[in-house]
Each structure stands twice: as structure tokens, then as C-alpha cells.
Image (tube, grey):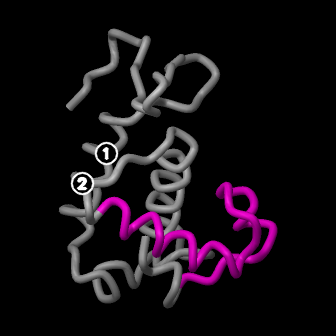
Amino acid sequence: MLNWGGPAEPTHEFAVALGFHNAESLSRDVWNLWKTLETEGALPAADWRRVLLAAEVVFASDVVGAGLDWSIVSGFPDDESIRILRRLQRKLPRWRGSVQFTTDEDGHVHLSDLERPSS
């Protein structure tokens, strides 16, 4: 995600589609989200959605993300990165309409799709 402050430069419209206010706020906000994750702080479901989508795009997209330069700019090989990304995807709810999730008062996410593996 930290590549959004470096080689990855989204347009205003793309940043909004990722769930951020604008392109300028994306770089600032991903740093704040990263700091929260590093200190094992809790994130609300909406922020987890932004984290997941921003990570997916910056890793894979050669148009707006790091894409083919990913392993160079991140230091992570593609195969390791995709394993990490898949683990994250399996731990987080699917935001598609066909799969539901709920959040409790503390903002913890609970999957209601019992068929989906959790790890």
C-alpha cells in the first residue's frame, strides 16, 4: 500500500473509486492506515475494504499501480505477494452482493458465508 505514495499515481476519479476522498488524500490516508495496521490497531470494515482494494490494485495494475515493477519497488516477489494477498482476501469479507457480512459494535467483521474459508 505504501507504493501509493511513490510509483503508483492514481487519478482523482480512481482514488474516489478506491474509497478515498481524492488522489492527494489517498497517499496520506494509506500511510495512516498502514500505521494503524503496524500497531495492530483496529480498523472499521470500510477501512479494511479500502486496504484490500488499494493493495489489490497497487500490486496488480500496471496502469495505475506498481504492476510489473512491483517486485522491484516493494522488495516482495510476485509469488510471495499473491500468497499474502490471497490470505488477506480469505480473512476479510467479500464485498460482493452475493456474500454477506456484519460488523459488531467494536467494528469487528463477522462473515455470514460459512462456506468461505477463513484462513
Amino acid type of the residue tagged 1 in the rendering: Leu
Label 1: element kind = helix
Give the residue at the far right of this rendering. Answer: 13
Residue found at x 32% / y 52%: 85
Report crowding for label 2: few under 14, some 14 to 19, many 20 or more residues within 10 A (C-alpha).
Answer: few
Q: Which residue is mark 1?
A: 88
**Residue 83: % across, % down:** 22, 52
Q: Which secondary structure dominates the residues rendered in magenta? A: helix
Asked whether the residues under the numbered discs 1 and 2 touch, taking CB atoms below 8 Å apart as contact, a structural biologist would say: yes
What residue span does the magenta drawing correspond to?
Answer: 8-37
Q: Residue at x 40, y 19 (%)?
A: 111
Q: Which residue is mark 2?
A: 84
Q: Nearer the viewer, residue 20 or 35?
A: 35
Q: CA distance from mark 1 to mark 2?
A: 6 Å
* Residue at left offset 56%, top offset 70%: 29
- Which quadrant would the C terminus be assigned to in this image? top left
Question: Is residue 39 magenta-colored?
Answer: no
**Badge 1 local density, few (<14 within 10 Å), some, or many (20+)?**
some
> Which element carries disc 2, helix, strand or loop?
helix
- Name the mark on residue 65: none
Q: Is residue 23 magenta?
A: yes
